[in-house]
Image (tube, helix red, strand yellow):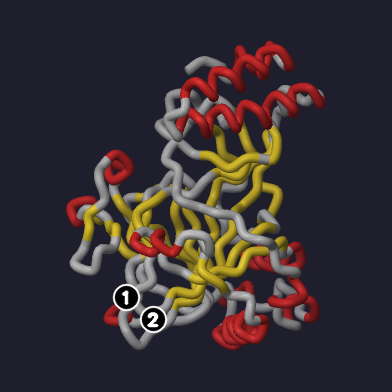
Amino acid sequence: MGNYSKYLSIVKEKDPVEEEKVAPDFIYEKDPCIGTKLITREKIPGFPYAEIFNNVFSEEECNEIISSLEESKEFSFWNPGNSSKRSYRNVDTIEGNMKSMSNFIWERIKGVFDFHEFEISDSDFYSEEDNIGKWKSVGIYEKMFFGRYRNGGHFGPHTDCSVCIDTNTRTLWTILLYLNTIPEEGGGATSFLDQAQSSQKRFIDELGRERYNPNNLITKVQPKAGRVVTFFISDVHEGEPVSPGYTKYILRTDILYKRVNPILTSDLDQRAYALWLKGKNYIYKGNLEKAREIFKQVSEISPELATKFNCVC
């Protein structure tokens, strides 16, 4: 499995927490279809694949999730080994494989989600060698994280990585669930940005935080308890700083897709693909020598994959 995107965000995996430690009782006891009729939706201007779903969870349900998270005492800084990263991303997180919760969320939103089938061609700006083709949604990816942003907490401009399980299974859409309501003066909005931000230097604000260039702002979505924002993984966005006196809680996961017409299905192909992903990451990090070394191995294991996914750098 690999995580990569053309525009890598700073993400560090932490030791997973068991679902039973953080999931509230209603996830196991309640019919997820109850309450779906209350869901309303709206488009996000300027982003054809982005939508807002309101009332996916009730405020009471959100409060139960927050209570379970806090009672678990599992929150910790997202990158324990490097506190200097706060200038770009300042948040406490809990990560884990949440199968029951992912199933619950999917049952809540699958009836209002628009992009169950999606085709990517090589001319699309978000195309990559391994995502071209027709894809069909199969559910919520069970790995998710919960975030707690306190005074000043933010996440600088970024795109979300695609989680690549194999050549025919990957994530394509982000799911962002707000667990509490914050008024505009409390900050914490999700700002959607022009793609130009991906290739520009980040703006440094008066507190030394890495932010977006103000000229690139297109629109904002304010946190509201039970509200879900969903968007394509390559949409550039930022979690704006939270103002003093406020705390922002979120749940972040992805929608998982499978290729309609599978390709490169042998065990050798999958071994080669795992290596190919590593090679791509080395390219994005600027280590071309290491990438070439890995791509040579890919070509030896699966010549077909090496040709199809363009193993050169």
Picture coordinates of residue 278, whole percent (x, y): 60, 32
Give the residue drawn at x 23%, y 69%.
207
Name above or below for residue 266 compared with residue 101. Answer: above
* Of the pair 102 and 292, the residue shown nearer to us: 292
Q: What residue sits right under mark 1 in the picture?
A: 187
Name above or below for residue 309 compared with residue 199. Answer: above
Q: Quadrant of the N terminus?
A: top right
Q: Residue 217's quadrant in the figure?
A: bottom left
Label 2 sits on what residue type? Answer: Ile
Q: CA distance from mark 1 to mark 2?
A: 7 Å
Give the residue drawn at x 45%, y 43%.
8
Considering the numbered disc 1 on the image, is that residue within a helix, a strand or a loop?
loop
Q: Residues within 10 Å of mark 1 (few under 14, many from 20)?
A: many
* Of the pair 197 and 286, the residue shown nearer to us: 286
Q: What residue sits right under mark 2 in the picture?
A: 182
| Relative side of 121 to 242, left or right | right
Instruction: Give the residue at the far front of this rendering.
Output: 81
Q: Earlier in the sequence, mark 1 or mark 2?
A: 2
Question: Would you say the residues marked 1 and 2 are in contact, meaning their CB atoms lie under 8 Å apart?
Answer: yes
Considering the numbered disc 2 on the image, is that residue within a helix, a strand or a loop?
loop
Label 1 sits on what residue type? Answer: Gly
Give the residue drawn at x 57%, y 77%.
38
Picture coordinates of residue 302, whole percent (x, y): 72, 16
